[in-house]
Amino acid sequence: MAVGQARGRTPSLVGAVVRDGRLVWSGSRSMIEGHAPDTDTQYRIGSLTKTFVAVLVMRLRDEGLLALTDPVGRQLPELGAEAGALTVGQLLAHTSGLASETPGPWWERTPGELRPELADVLGSDPVKHPAGSRHHYSNPGFALLGALVERLRGVPWGEALRTEVLDPLGMRRTTLLPQAPAAGGFAVHPWADVMTPEAVQETGRMAPAGQLWSTAADLARWAAFLASGHEGVLAPATVEEMRRPAAPPEATDPDGGYGLGVQLTRRGGRSLAGHTGSMPGFLAALWVSVEDGVGALALANCTSGPAVGAVAADLLAITADAEPGFPRPWRPADPVDPALLDLAGPWYWGTSGFALRVRSGSELQLAPLAGQGRGSRFHVEHDGTWTGREGYFAGETLRAVRRPDGTLSHLDLGSFVFTRAPYDPSAPVPGGFPGWSDR
């Protein structure tokens, strides 16, 4: 933190570390001795706002009020044919092809009254790339998502956020406009140690792209939520879905990526999820490592300078490396259906060996025995089949095929036949197999 504040030449810098869902460390540095910010000091968090808007959209999806494949124009017909054809999922993942910014003037530094309608946010030529062809970050895209939330909820998106997300999570210091104590934002001269205050604008239609203010204490709660979800706000499975890659990384940032409203990166061999943010006078970053059970954040009150994304990632890595968490104690599972246990053990796809393990919640995990090959986790469906959750078999169906007498014959995984012995001649191996006897 001290190095980040000094090298970044920021008036103040506050950071925090979250472990296993709770704030375990915080610290700050300030240009004024004895007046460092604490975890209750508000900073503007910029594009971290997008993660909040994405949660509202995913709530609508989970309630059945929309699908990620729906064209946004179904609810916002005023967008016209071109923009209206873009899907909700494309907007969340920044694969819609929409322009990165609004038509001038620069929306972050001008009043929202200059853009009263969605047409003013998009302009006359809003689509810059074919939809779905590439990742192209779009601030106007999240303005459309905020308007979508308002149309389906019948209230301003900030009001929906307060009642549906912030209040249930206890985030009472996260607001659309600053509430004291709040840091002032500054522009620091790039070639001299002088600074001047930045103006705070209410951005109107563009607010879903970067309007929110928050504190280190509130964002610690948000980090815990992005790691594990919260029943009543968003189920853990849906939050996990948001953290999955939904857009390819840019060629200039091969370690980057984007989920559904969530930024993804890799630092020091770790997969991190969260977001960075910037608005005139402020910088913010928040990352979580689900595998380590650790999250970290950093907030600064200057327009540019400190590498807050790196500071937050370093805080996380320092904690996870220097104080690695204890593994959860092994405990036996609840009683398991004998038919499920019947599936466990070694299987062969041709001559390649695999192990099928039964995990908690009737989940299955398939992994190659020799460390090479395609594996996946599978979750159970209502019809007794399983669906792949990751890798090559994501979305594919796994079925246990039984003989007329009820005994287990083989596994069918997307037409791949897995048998108990290599090329088991008693199983319906496609093309048949004569057996292993000498010929």
Image (cartoon, rainbow, N blue to C red):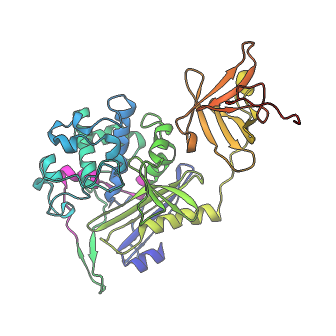
- Identify whether 146 is placed above or below 49: above
Check the image and name the residue furthest to the top: 405
**In percent of the image, x 46 and y 38: which residue is there?**
238
Rendered residue at 67%/39% (across/down): 366
**Which of the two residues, 230 or 256, is positioned nearer the viewer here?**
256
Tell me, yes or no, if residue 211 can be seen here. Answer: no
Observer-nearest of 191 and 351? 351
Taking 328 as reference, is 152 above or below it?
above
Tell me, yes or no, whether the highlighted magenta stretch contains residue 207: yes
Q: In the image, residue 299 lies at what x, y percent? A: 39, 64
Query: In front: 10, or 60?
Result: 60
In which quarter of the view is residue 167 placed? top left
For the C terminus, the quadrant is: top right
Furthest residue in direction front, as rendered: 439
Q: Locate residue 15 relative to residue 430 in the image: left or right.
A: left
Q: Is residue 129 left or right of residue 18?
A: left
Magenta extent:
198-219
- Magenta span contains residue 369: no
